[in-house]
Amino acid sequence: MERRREAALTAGTAGRRLTSIDGGRGDGPAEPAGPPQRPGGVRRLRPERDRAAQPPTVPEQARLWHVVLSVSGQVTPLPSLRASLEQLAHDHSFFLTARYAADHAEIRYWEQARDLHDAAAIALRLWGEHKVTANLPPWEIVGLEVVDRATYHKRVAEGFGDPPPHLGGVHPY
């Protein structure tokens, strides 16, 4: 029984070469089996060509950014505007609050992004991407503020940048 297992394990490996040693992948003649080629009992490993050219990547942590998006445009009936903003609140995660009037609105929410550039880019796309699904009016973005979480909480603690009077939901000015 031992002979069959050993034969089965070695039968298909006769032509294989290790890729971590010189001679693997057909770079040249394969190293002969037997004693190591370098002093000290260690074989020389082939340098890693692909990984050496690229620095090691560290996974970047996403951060929370407080976003205030201001939009403005032609007068829109308030009931339909409220329904559209409520649909946007339902569709978009981290939505905090929205204030609105017939010709402008302000949306406050948290955005999770790698850095300020990503958070701002996502915020600038928000209105256009949800225009159809939330039936938003064809308004343009007229203002954008993006601050990190620590700055937002520092402002609130110092009495500046108070949170809106109605936390959560969609409210008229």
Image (tube, grey):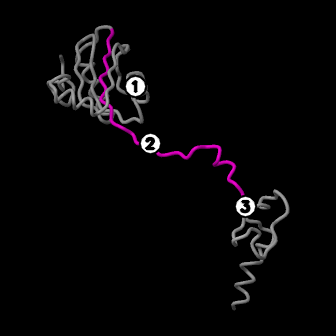
Query: How many numbered discs, if any?
Result: 3
In the image, farthest residue toward the bottom: 1
Say which element carries label 2. Answer: loop
| Residue type indicated by callout 2 | Glu
In the image, farthest residue toward the front: 39
Q: Position of residue 158 (x, y in %)?
A: 16, 26
- Look at 42% across and 24% down and name the residue there: 125
Q: Position of residue 163 (x, y in %)?
A: 18, 26
- Look at 74% across and 68% down and name the residue there: 38
**Residue under numbered circle 3:** 19
| Image: magenta residue range | 45-73
In this rendering, the answer to whether 164 lies above or below 33 is above
Return the residue nearer the eye: 154 or 69: 154
Q: Position of residue 44 (x, y in %)?
A: 72, 63
| Residue type indicated by callout 3 | Thr
**Which-is-in-front pick, marks 2 and 1?**
2
**Residue under numbered circle 1:** 120
Left or right of 36 in this view: 106:
left
Residue 102 appears in which quarter of the rendering?
top left
**Residue under numbered circle 2:** 60
